Image: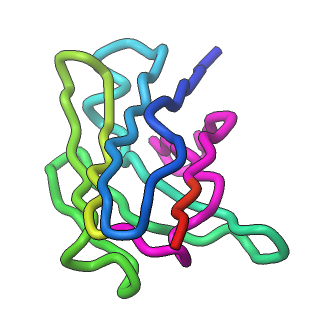
Amino acid sequence: QVQLVESGGGLVQAGGSLRLSCAASVSGSIFRISTMGWYRQAPGKQRELVAYITSAGSTDYADSVKGRFTISRDNAKNTVYLQMNSLKPEDTAVYYCNLKFHTANDYWGQGTQVTVSS
């Protein structure tokens, strides 16, 4: 059973930084072929894609975070990261890690709260 465990959330002032981590309990071979993503859900809003990184290392970001957030992965540690800089109050949300491979395999973490105060 795949488990994703997020960490690194917390309370930060506007303009500050946080680094989220997501450790995946899968084999290294599965992790290496997986696309890893970070999503977020603010109160009263739908879950939205923040960033993803493919097995080849290609990345893409939501327009709202481009230039401020960076997604990366460490295949040796089965871990994906989200470096968040210049945080804004509108970045406040629960952030979820996602792992996808072979189309039908789609797994989610429990989420980590990020709160940005103004």
* Towards the viewer: 28 or 23: 23
Give coordinates of residue 115: x percent, y percent.
58, 56
- The part of the image, by quadrant, that contains residue 42 is bottom right
Q: Position of residue 67 (x, y in %)?
A: 19, 77
Does residue 89 belong to the magenta stretch?
A: yes
Image-based side of 39 in relation to 71, left or right = right
Report whether 82 appears left or right of 101: left
Q: Position of residue 59 (x, y in %)?
A: 22, 63
How did the renderer colour the structure? rainbow
Asked if 69 appears above or below 99 in the picture, the reply is below
Q: Of all residues shown, which one is farthest toward the right? A: 44
Q: Quadrant of the N terminus?
A: top right
Name the foreground residue: 63 vs 93: 93
Q: Is residue 31 above or below residue 107?
A: above
Q: Quadrant of residue 26?
A: top left
Residue at x-position 35% and y-position 47%: 18
Position in image of residue 87 (x %, y %): 37, 67
Identity of the residue drawn at 15% across and 51% down: 57
Residue located 21% across and 46% down the image? 72
Magenta span contains residue 66:
no
Q: What number of labels is visible?
A: 0
- Give the camera-side residue of 105 and 19: 19
User: Which residue occupies the extreme bottom position in the image?
Assistant: 63
Point 53% across, 48% down: residue: 11
In the displayed structure, 34 sits above or below 61; it is above
- For the record, the magenta segment spans 87-114
**Apparent side of residue 90 relative to residue 61 in the rendered image (left or right):** right
